[in-house]
Image (cartoon, grey):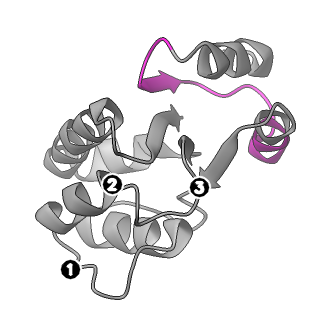
Amino acid sequence: MQPEAIVEAVLHGTYPIIEAPLEGELEALIKTLQDRGLQVVWVDRAPVFDKDTLLHALYQSCGLPAWFGFNWDALADTLGDDEIHEAKSVVLVFGHFSLLRQRSPDTCDTFLDILTEATDLPHGWVRQALLLN
């Protein structure tokens, strides 16, 4: 998918989770989203390939609180609490989501379920997730 099409899909907010192949540079796409006024968090700057690396990447990139428990319940609680993150309407960006999907499909499915629920919550701070491959 072309970067322009990805930006338009995110701006329209029709889908809480957008999964697409990326044609072009991830950094340029993130900058374009930020230039359009979106709060963007790039989650997988280091490889994310299982539950532990996913939860640690989210903890670090999103600035989750020190009490974060590194388990699925803690993730659901923090993604759904607007007091956790100072920014509202955050777009989580994964640049290499296929690595997690290939190496740990069960983790991937559980994460997507939690993420889908979090984007539906009126008091959550995650607006969307952009999963690029």
62 vs 17: above or below: below
Which residue sits at x=22%, y=36%?
Answer: 117
Side of 130 where 41 appears, left or right: right
Residue bearing mark 3: 87
Q: Nearer the viewer, residue 71 or 68?
A: 68
Q: Looking at the figure, which quarter contains the N terminus?
A: top right
Q: Nearer the viewer, mark 1 or mark 3?
A: 3
Q: Is residue 15 magenta?
A: yes
Please state if 113 lies on the left or on the right of 29 as rendered.
left
How many residues crowd mark 2 within 10 Å: few (<14), some (14–19), many (20+)?
Answer: many
Image quarter for residue 58? bottom left
Neighbours of disc 3 within 10 Å: few (<14), some (14-19), many (20+): some
Which is more foreground, mark 3 or mark 2?
Answer: 3
Q: Could you tell me if the residues under marks 3 and 2 are in contact, i.e. CB atoms within 8 Å?
A: no
Report helix, strand or loop for mark 2.
helix
Given residues 115 and 24, the one toward you in this image is 115
Q: Which amino acid, mark 1?
A: Gly
> Where does label 2 land, which residue?
79
Query: In the rendered structure, are the residues bearing label 1 and label 3 in contact, judged by CB atoms less than 8 Å apart?
Result: no
Residue type at mark 2 is Leu
Q: Is residue 102 magenta?
A: no
Task: Please tell me which residue is depicted at 34% across the width and 44% down the height of the picture.
Answer: 123
User: For the residues marked 3 and 2, what is the alpha-carbon distance in whole angstroms?
Assistant: 12 Å
Residue at x-position 13% and y-position 46%: 106
Between the C-alphas of marks 2 and 1, the distance is 13 Å
The span picked out in magenta is: 14-31
Q: Residue at x 33, y 54 (%)?
A: 79
**x and y percentages locating residue 48 in the rendered image:** 42, 61
